[in-house]
Image (tube, rainbow, N blue to C red):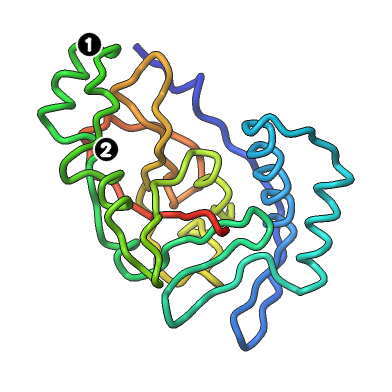
Amino acid sequence: MNFYKSIIWLSLVSFATICNANSLFISTSSVQIAKETLAQQRAIAGLVLNDDSINKEIAKVEKKSTIYVRDNINNTVTNRVTKVMWQDDNATAVIKKPWLIIENYKICDANYTNPMCLDTKGDTAVTYCKELVMGGHSDWQLPSQVELESLPNYGKTTAIEDTTFKNANAGSYWSSTTIKGYENFASIVPFYNGAINAANKNKRKNVRCIRNIK
């Protein structure tokens, strides 16, 4: 059954890049995406939303001339609006993992309601992030679809802001978001175009971990 129409959409955004010698970065698309991501995160948390409060948070960051800030020593990138840190070492461009190990996937594929559809033990993308120790932090996790879709810079061959993110390829990256009703699939972001898509959980895809900033 073709279910992609219910989960795929493409958002076209304009962008303008400003960067300095320290590789600090801000763009019109990043501001808008950051605002949308922040609003979605607040909605999920059940917080009251209003444009004024979101704009104030954006303004604070804009005054400091950057949304994304790179740490070249630890190979991480921090989003100062959504308060998250991204892994950005060479591994993010080369390592590929399945969402489920093959044994669990076979069970899940036969019955979408089986708990094994969410059992990420073993050599999986989720486990990789949980076990990652980087930049002195060990609280990494696989990003949600909302978090992952905040990264693409539409119109680029490798759709990620490469003035700050130094490691990426044009492949597809796993999110932690399972497709409702098709639990043998999880959402992915192909970085060759930035469009949301989905893949069977036994497929090997790129992994880029994320952590919340306290």
- Measured along the vertical axis of the image, is residue 154 above or below residue 168? above
Q: CA distance from mark 1 to mark 2?
A: 16 Å
Between 147 and 132, the one nearer to me in the picture = 132
Name the residue: 43% across, 18% down: 180
User: What x and y, as percent, mark residue 195?
Assistant: 51, 40
Left or right position of 125 against 177: left
Residue at image location 40% in from the left, 38% down from the top: 176
Q: Secondary structure at mark 1?
A: loop
Name the residue carrying label 1.
111
The residue lying at 34 percent from left, 11 percent from top is 1
> Could you say which is closer to the camera, residue 187 or residue 154?
187
Give the secondary structure at mark 2.
Answer: loop
| Residue type highlighted by circle 1 | Asn
Location of residue 203 in the rendering, given as x and y in whole percent from the top left corner: 23, 38
Q: Within 10 Å of the Cα at label 2, are there few (<14), some (14-19), or many (20+) other Cα atoms?
A: many
Q: Position of residue 173 (x, y in %)?
A: 38, 47
Quarter of the image with the C terminus is: bottom right
Sequence-first tag of 1 and 2: 2
Q: Which residue position holds label 2?
A: 99
Position above or below: 153 against 74: above
